[in-house]
Image (cartoon, rainbow, N blue to C red):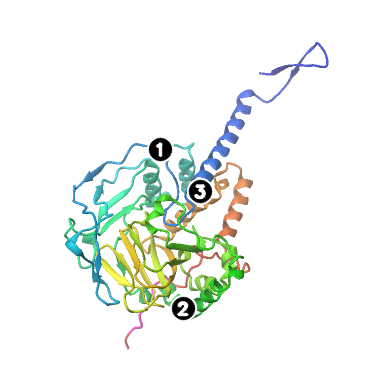
Amino acid sequence: MVLVIQDRSSTKMSKLITAPILTLLSHLICDLNRILICCDAHENRACHQSSFTGFGYRPPRHRSRKKEVNHHLSIPSQHHYRVAHLSRTMPLQMDGGTTTGIDRTISILPTTKPLAPRTFAGQVEQALQQRFPAQKIQRVLDSWRLLDMGYEHRAFVGMEQNPPIADAANSRCYQHAPSYLPGLKAVEWWDNVKDDFVWAQKLSKSYKDIRHEFLSVISNPEKLHGGNNIWAGALTTDAASYGEGWKTLVLINRGQWDEANANLFPVTSRAIHESGVPAAEVFFASMKPRTNIKPHSDFTNFVLTSHLPLVIPENGKNKCRLSVGDHTRQWIEGEIIMFDTSIYHDAVNDSDEMRYILMLRVWHPDLTTNEKEALQFIYDCLEVPELLSDDPETVLIAEQRAKMMRDFPLRRDLAGGGGFGGTSKGKGKVKKKSKK
């Protein structure tokens, strides 16, 4: 097959021998597909550049709705907290026994199937299967497919608590996770964090240095000018529950360091890196006086939330409190806490001063190494969609770029990355000394 064109310099026809038309069209379609995939990824990234959105991927709107069973449990109109002046967990007491903002819908987990190969989600799935043994990341594949289906996991998880909570009609212990990975434990509070996790034990030792640096930097407006998105508010309507009184200053997002802010807080950044925090996100969070955060979910069950309280007004007097499910605790300066924010939770600052914490979103301890790496690869694809290219050279460049974004920016000479890549020695548990 040949192309025939008019030679304008003469009246004669010229036959130009070319590559077969089908091959040419095939190349054009592949190139167009790459462009569409990249545009799709960049669109999703732009629409969901905020914390607590899980994968941050927006599935196609034409997907069918999830099948749900509504238990028709009543949701009264308002509630108020009455809590004792204790630092330990306590049952949540509410005036009149009423709650608001808690969706008690129960979802049915659907069966998943492979995704269409020429969609962005399908390309990610194929890349995952090429990089990891499918049997070792099956839960991640199911999670990605469920998200593409538009599934939102909703469940009563009271019976998973210790002691179990059986009163589903009056409990707030409900999980909501559009980014849902099956089979992970869902408990309100993870106790004994410093005893069970090496990274928490190490990071807590740096509390005084982190607090000193933080106060020094935020008191100097000239220094803050060198940062990136300093004290940003919620970027999406999904995060509207946080209100206008809640702001963040990001150090790590989706396992990738913010180099400008890491340089602004080098002591804190090194403490996070050297402690081996298994972080997907890390940021400072502020909360204005006399404000509250409404009951909400952070939409993701495969990361947990940990706080290192830095500045707590009237510390120890229960002015600044956090409720997860049916139990409430107060922030205590220097004491690391960890909880599951896929379970409905809320917060209050009843003091007359600002509250500041270092917030860490860490991989769920029940995840395997392969699963954490696969989840990080999905994050990388959302930031660097060229990882899905058919061209090996393009993929290599994209891999180098993604790695640089994960690497600890203040000490490039060190092997391994910060955030997701940084790991402590051993299996992450503190070994108990054997009795002699």
Real-space CA distance between mark 2 and mark 1, rounded to the nearest whole angstrom = 45 Å
Query: Which circle marks residue 45 in the picture?
Result: 3
Disc 2 on helix, strand or loop? Answer: helix
Looking at the image, which is closer to me, 75 or 159?
75
Looking at the image, how many numbered discs can be counted on the residues? 3
Q: Which residues are magenta?
A: 429-434
C-alpha gap between disc 1 and disc 3: 16 Å
Q: Nearer the viewer, residue 235 or 55?
A: 235
Which residue bears the numbered disc 2? 207
Name the residue type under label 3. Arg
Question: Label 2 neighbourhood size at 10 Å, few (<14), some (14-19), many (20+)?
Answer: many
**CA separation, marks 2 and 3?**
33 Å
Expressed as whole percent of the image width and height from the top left, the position of residue 236 reads: 44, 51
Q: Is residue 363 visible?
A: yes
Q: Residues within 10 Å of mark 3 (few under 14, many from 20)?
A: many
Q: Residue furthest right?
A: 9
Label 1, secondary structure: give it.
loop
Q: Nearer the viewer, residue 113 or 321?
A: 321
- Which residue matches tag 1? 61
Q: Position of residue 200 (x, y in %)?
A: 42, 74
